[in-house]
Image (cartoon, rainbow, N blue to C red):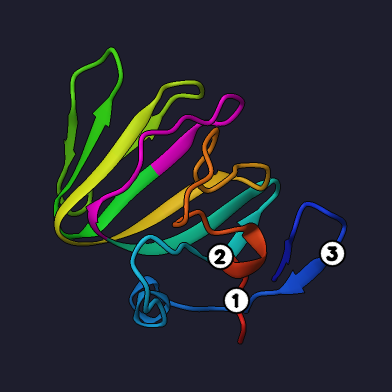
Amino acid sequence: MRASTGEGKDVTVMNTTTIAAELAKVTDHWTPRIIGQVNDQYVKVAKLLGEFVWHAHENEDELFWVISGRLRIQLEGHDEVVLEPGEFFVVPRGVRHNPIAEEEVELVLIETVTTAHTGDVVVDRTVPIERQLPTS
């Protein structure tokens, strides 16, 4: 399988894997790791702990699928969403949101290859796509 950086550079990801095996490779919280690509969608895994940052993705929806832990997603102008293991939620494009993990959360993210990590804001925890690509 190959992943594209969106800049014409393809990277081989892997042939088969498990979510658990890929999550075991994640060492830093809030640092997504690309594990596959389906057309123009990246499949990523991440571990979260604490509060992230309010942000929006103006042109892209973002899917959060909780594998373990409990994730709260604050949504500007909408009720907060709470996800338990096995549940997912799609944050619609343009909706400002702030993920919060009071305990460690392991999750899968599905988002287009054009989705910037922290959307419309850049903070010290913003991870560029190059650092999300697998190294092995």
Which residue type does callout 2 highlight?
A: Ile
| Rendered-image quadrant of the C terminus | bottom right
Residue pictured at 50% horizontal, 21% vertical: 94
| Boundaries of the magenta span | 49-63
Q: Quadrant of residue 92?
A: top left
Describe the element under mark 3 as helix, strand or loop: loop
Q: Name the residue beneath numbered marker 2.
A: 34
Q: Position of residue 104 (x, y in %)?
A: 18, 64
Q: Name the residue beneath numbered marker 3.
A: 9
Using residue 22 as the reference point, say whether residue 86 is left or right of it: left
| Rendered-image quadrant of the N terminus | bottom right
Query: In the picture shown, does residue 88 fall above or below 106?
Result: above
Using residue 32 as the reference point, say whether residue 49 is left or right of it: left
The circle drawn on residue 7 is none
The circle drawn on residue 134 is 1
Q: Quadrant of residue 60?
A: top right
Marks 3 and 2: in contact by CB < 8 Å? no
Which is nearer the eye, 110 or 130? 130
* Real-space Cα separation, disc 2 to disc 1, in angstroms: 6 Å
Residue closest to the far right? 8
Describe the element under mark 2 as helix, strand or loop: strand
Mark 2, residues whose alpha carbon is within 10 Å: few (<14), some, or many (≥20)?
many
Q: Main secondary structure of the magenta part?
A: loop
Along the polypeptide, which appears first: circle 2 or circle 3?
3
* Real-space Cα separation, disc 3 to disc 1, in angstroms: 13 Å
Residue 58 lies within the magenta run: yes
Marks 1 and 2: in contact by CB < 8 Å? yes
